[in-house]
Amino acid sequence: MKGHNNLIKNIERLGERYCRRHLDLWNTKRLQDNWWEALKFFFNHSFMRGRRDELSNEYYHFTIRTLESYFPISDQSLDRDYEKIKEQKEYFNKECILKFKKERKIGRGNSIKNGDFRKEVAENNPIIELLTTRKKIEVKWERETYNKKLFLGNDEDVMMVLDVLKFISDDKKNIYNYLRNTIVNSGVKAAYEELTKMRGISDKLATLTIRDIGLINLGIINKDYKWAF
């Protein structure tokens, strides 16, 4: 029994440490009230695609800065800024990349490495062009801040960003609220299924996102635990 109690205490300590490191930087009210903050929260999770956390963090910061350069986002004009994103919805379609991959018989390969990708795909879509163009940005990692030239060099990352932008532009707006409300009203499995429809959102990323929303909102996950862990 003593060993069991120690195990529980160790798990609790690890959980508290995880929350301090990864979740304390997110303000719950701001996530609920600010769709852009909610989008940053989501991208902060969705780039964790089985590579070094530091590299995923760099891609996250690059994507946020790139989108901010294309869509001027301000806390004072969030509703108007969201409408501007909806107006650009035609550029959130990943089919141009999939079509290029099919025509060039690239299969599961990375189409961005193809010499014709920029001319035939990127130059016809300003979002894709920005995401695949190297530029210097400021990166924050743990207690360090540094500058680095970055771009998204993997088409799966680019298609994931496009799918997420398309998702929020379909009048869902605040992706954090949408997922939280789905968990509360329809269950964890429904939120999981919504997430895994997006390109690049694997089982691991879906459960990570759901779990963290549950940790921020204690009590909303009271069954279907397998979809959150």
Image (tube, rainbow, N blue to C red):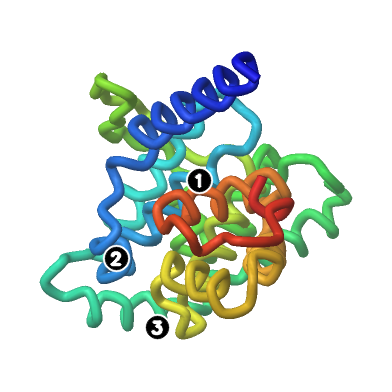
Give the Cα separation between the discs numbered 2 and 1: 21 Å
Task: Specify whether residue 144 is in view.
Answer: yes
Q: Foreground residue, 150 or 46?
A: 46
Which residue type does callout 3 highlight?
Glu
Task: Describe residue 115's horizontal placement relative to residue 40 as left or right.
Answer: right
- Residue with the mark numbered 1: 45
Task: Specify whether residue 91 is in view.
Answer: no
The residue lying at 48 percent from left, 25 percent from top is 14
Q: Position of residue 26 (x, y in %)?
A: 30, 48
Which residue type does callout 2 highlight?
Phe
- Residue with the mark numbered 3: 87
Where disc 2 sits, the SS reads loop
Tags 3 and 1 touching, CB below 8 Å: no
Which residue type does callout 1 highlight?
His
Q: Position of residue 119 (x, y in %)?
A: 59, 54
Where disc 1 sits, the SS reads helix
First along the sequence among labels 3 and 2 = 2
Instruction: Give the number of the mark in front: 2 or 1.
Output: 1
Q: Quadrant of the C terminus?
A: top right
Where disc 3 sits, the SS reads helix
- Residue with the mark numbered 2: 71
Is residue 97 shown above or below 139? below
First along the sequence among labels 3 and 1 = 1
The residue lying at 41 percent from left, 58 percent from top is 217
Q: Residues within 10 Å of mark 2 (few under 14, many from 20)?
A: some
Task: Describe residue 182's horizontal placement relative to residue 103 as left or right.
Answer: left
